[in-house]
Amino acid sequence: MSVLFFKRFLQRPFQIASIVPSSKALVERVARKMDFSQPRVIAEYGPGEGVHSREIARRMSPDSHLLLFELDPAFSRDLEGQFAGDRRVHVVHGDAVRLPQELARRGIAHCDYILSGIPFSILKIDKKRALLQKTHDALVPGGSFIIYQITNELKQHATLFAHAESEYFLQNIPPMFITVFQKAPALNSGRRREMEWTRFPANRQA
């Protein structure tokens, strides 16, 4: 854990999901939820010191784009320094609700994946629903919204999505729920139906 991460947690404990960054095992598990075999547009909400961002950038193709939305000014400056030489990575010091505007500003239509580690449980219900709506709308049909959270309460609000899969990942401190919400493919995008939910047993690998 970096000194910067620890200091920012002490100063803003309710805006940073955990006292320690994601473990290497969690980072790799989350990255495996994405297909990097072709150019992708990926957004990340609340990257913090960038442990997931670095892994995504390492895996994605030269023609891909990664948009990082970070509210904390110290983290934003640190991310800008980390990715200063990578033209694929765009650091946005601001709220994730700006995603549609930031995509439009860069001439990008949709995201293939959106990743979030922000603690949705602390957001007011209106803010939560507004961000979920913008997230859903920004995804390409069939695209995925991937979250890692201490609680699994977001599933009751993410009803816009057609399908969700969740697992409880123990190789992290604290353990995290990893949930993948999938937007309906184009053929089904006009139909509203109850979200299909799949839960996997807790991961217990050493």
Image (spheres, rainbow, N blue to C red):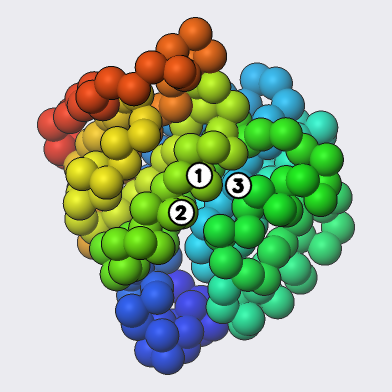
Q: Measured from the top left, where is residue 14 in percent x and y?
A: 33, 79
**Up/down of 101 relative to 16, above or below:** above
Label 3: which residue?
43
Label 1: which residue?
135
Quadrant hosting residue 69: bottom right
Secondary structure beneath dot 2 equals helix
Quadrant hosting residue 172: bottom left
Q: CA distance from mark 1 to mark 3?
A: 10 Å
Quarter holding the N terminus? bottom left
Q: Measured from the top left, where is residue 130 in percent x and y?
A: 44, 54
How would you rate the neighbour count of disc 1 (Cα within 10 Å): few for under 14, some for 14-19, many for 20 or more? Answer: many
How would you rate the neighbour count of disc 2 (Cα within 10 Å): few for under 14, some for 14-19, many for 20 or more? Answer: some
Residue type at tag 1: Thr
How would you rate the neighbour count of disc 3 (Cα within 10 Å): few for under 14, some for 14-19, many for 20 or more? Answer: many
Residue at point 30%, 62% (across, down):
125
- Sequence-wise first label, 3 or 2: 3
Residue type at tag 3: Ala
| Residue 24 visible in the shown view | no
Label 2: which residue?
131
Left/right of residue 135 with respect to residue 193 in the rendered view: right
Residue at point 44%, 12% (across, down):
188
Residue type at tag 2: Leu
Q: Are marks 2 and 1 in contact (CB under 8 Å)?
A: yes
Q: CA distance from mark 2 to mark 1?
A: 6 Å
